[in-house]
Image: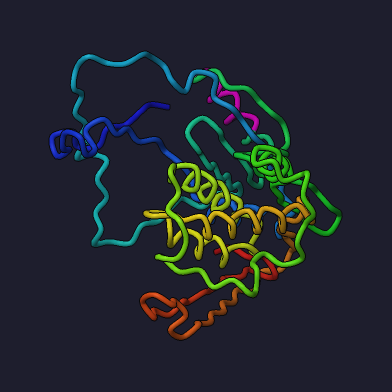
Amino acid sequence: MINRVITRYSQQAEVDYTETFFPIVKMTTIRVLVTVVVKKGWDIFQLDVNNAFLHGDLYEDVYMEVLPSLLIDQSGPHKMKTSSSTIFVAVYVDDVIITGTDLVEIANLKTFLDKQFRIKDLGRLHYFLGLEVLYKPDGVIISQRKFTLDLLKEYGCFAYNNFSSPLDPTLKLKADEGTLLPDPTYYKKLVGKLNFLTNTRLDIAYNVQLLSQFIQAPRDTHLTAAFYLLRYLKKDPTLGIFFSNGCSISACYDSEWAACPDSRRSVIGYIILVGDNPIS
């Protein structure tokens, strides 16, 4: 596990000169992986790398290029040797998920990784990047209950009644209506956290994208709508996604013509399902 600076010579001062990069897995990939695990009946485990940050700051520039021996010829087909075992490894900085068909090979991989990096074996996957995993006889439930409760506590929503819908139907948000917030970062942080919550709360996805349209110059009306959404979450913080063992792939989309009152741009939404499981 190392920090990566990509082609430092192409970076610009005060733009991206200090950026570092980590190997991470997308949430879509995690949802696909959980779907496969449920369908195949595999076990899924979690590891934590103790020394992901090996050293302090470097005082020298280090440049990296891919070795010619690692480049793959794109002109020909790529094949792998036939094997009776399959192992999937998903990495998010220092958090690792491992699953597959062969528990012995998984155990061997854990031993190898521990020798290389010193890892902490956390056992069966239960909590990963704020996602809580609950195993049922007929599938898996993934929620963000703790994250939601912490969010409600942070913004003082427990003292208020909850709402039955995520958006006030009488409210039409516009970019230039209302008073500009003195501290726009307060609104930006709230919307960012709500956006992370859409990993398991698809019922608020439309509302979060609506609130995100006003990130640059948020006003008090936009903040009111964001708190309205928080009070909707208070209704049931335990809601999440249930992953069953279906495997058919389907996709749906819809659009709202000229929905934006400011620009008259349309809003398009889509969902991709594997079985009954929302993937993207």
Q: Would you place residue 201 above or below residue 156 in this image? A: below
Q: Determine the image quadrant of residue 67.
A: top left
Q: Would you place residue 237 above or below residue 66 in this image? A: below
- Residue 14 left/right relative to 200: left
Q: Give coordinates of residue 14: x percent, y percent.
A: 20, 34
At 60% across and 74% down in the image, what residue appears?
A: 249
Most common SS among magenta residues:
helix
> What segment carries the magenta color?
107-116
- Using the rendered image of the protein, determine whether residue 189 is visible from the camera's viewpoint: yes
Q: Give coordinates of residue 140: x percent, y percent.
A: 76, 53
Q: Would you place residue 170 above or below residue 33 in this image? A: below
Q: Give coordinates of residue 155: x percent, y percent.
A: 65, 41
- Residue 117 left/right relative to 158: left
Location of the N terminus by quadrant is top left
Q: How is the image coloured?
A: rainbow
Outermost residue toward the right in this view: 137
At 75% across and 52% down in the image, what residue appears?
A: 234
- Using the rendered image of the protein, determine whether residue 43 is visible from the camera's viewpoint: no
Magenta stretch containing residue 111, yes or no?
A: yes
Q: How many marks?
A: 0
Q: Give coordinates of residue 192: x percent, y percent.
A: 51, 48
At 54% across and 60% down in the image, what residue appears?
A: 208
Outermost residue toward the left in this view: 9
